[in-house]
Image: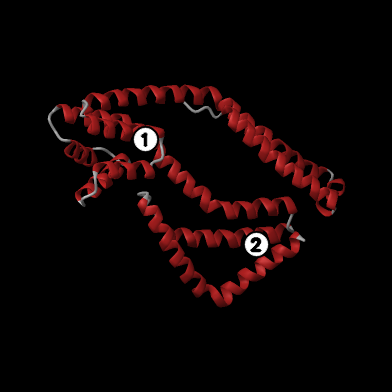
Amino acid sequence: MLTYIAVFFIILVTLILAFGLPAVLKKADDGAGAFEGALNERFIFLDLKKYFLLYFVFSVLILLVLLAIGFQPLFTIVMIGSLIAAPLVAYKIFLKRRIASFEKQLPDGLQMIAGALRAGSSLSASLLQLSTEFPAPLSQEISLVVREQKLGLNIDLCLQNLAERMPLNSVILTVSTIRIANETGGELAESLARTANTLRLIEQAEGKIAALTSQGKMQAWVVGLMPVSLIVVLNKMEPEAMGQLWTTKEGWLALAMIIVFEFLGIYVIRKIVNIDV
């Protein structure tokens, strides 16, 4: 069955290369432009046309490799799954790194705003100073807040938009602090300084927890990859016996149960070691 599917994919790729490549590239270019616009809103600037070309070439190479090795079922499933998941995984990695960098810069940025407020600057002027003197990505997000405010939006709405773009507890705490201080007339500089100190303490606690739970996370991957490794080794050592796993209904049922329990085990272990401060 998998052999027929792989042959179908190769025939499809051949027809696309022969007849429909310009149309496919045009549609892909339109889709890449829309996706690139969504990335630009997150200040992630990539030339997706080049990445799409590399992705297309990589897809063809994988199909050729599958053809050369005779379409081993397990390897075919892994490669096709990796090919489908690659763009989404890459996007999540970029987004995760950006959010992590923003959260790490936020306490220093709040301390800078607090110092500017003590020196007599307004909140708008302090945000503008932060957007020009601080590195990305914090400066990029704050500059967007400043531009929205210049267009006439209320400062509370601008900060709420920031919290929606950066769904972090630290950002929600910061936005709440500024809004409460503006509504009650409290000392904003002191509130932001205390918030910055609180965020630093939380960051230190999260770092200690991450170090203590790193072994458990690694154990999750080891336990998850061990059955897959055993299947590959046994398939090489006893191909005739393992052939029942790929060619019979009972074998397919066993594979399905293995996949379900693999993901369930990794999910449970990661939930156990994932401690939120």
Residue 47 showing in the rendered view: no
Assess disc 1: are there few (<14), some (14-19) or many (≥20) residues with their C-alpha within 10 Å of its C-alpha.
some
Q: How many marks?
A: 2
Q: Depth check: give the residue in front, 271 or 13.
A: 271
Q: Residue 151, image x and y in percent?
A: 21, 52
Query: Label 1 sits on what residue type?
Result: Ile
Q: Residue visible at 54% across and 62% down? A: 56
1 vs 2, front mark = 1
Instruction: Name, please, the residue furthest toward the front.
Output: 184
Is 153 placed left or right of 228 in the picture? left
Q: Is residue 254 left or right of residue 118?
A: right
Tag 1 near tag 2, CB within 8 Å: no
| Residue at the disc numbered 2 | 64
The one nearer the camera, 224 or 151, is 151
Tell me the residue at 55%/51% (across/down). 86
To which quarter of the image does residue 191 belong?
A: top left
Q: Earlier in the sequence, mark 1 or mark 2?
A: 2
**Quadrant, the N terminus:** bottom right
Q: Residue at x 36, y 53 (%)?
A: 40
- Give the structural element (helix, strand or loop) at label 1: helix
Q: Residue 232 at x, y = what percent?
A: 75, 44
Specify the farthest residue to the left.
120
Q: How is the image coloured?
A: secondary structure
Q: Position of residue 217 (x, y in %)?
A: 59, 30
Amino acid found under the numbered disc labelled 2: Leu
Any part of residue 261 in sight: yes
Q: In the displayed structure, does residue 192 sit left or right of residue 233?
A: left
Q: CA gap, disc 1 to disc 2?
A: 50 Å
Q: Residue at point 36% right, 37% down? A: 102
Disc 2 residue crowd, few under 14, some 14–19, many 20+, Cα 10 Å: some
- Quick one: SS at disc 2? helix
Which disc, if any, is residue 172? 1
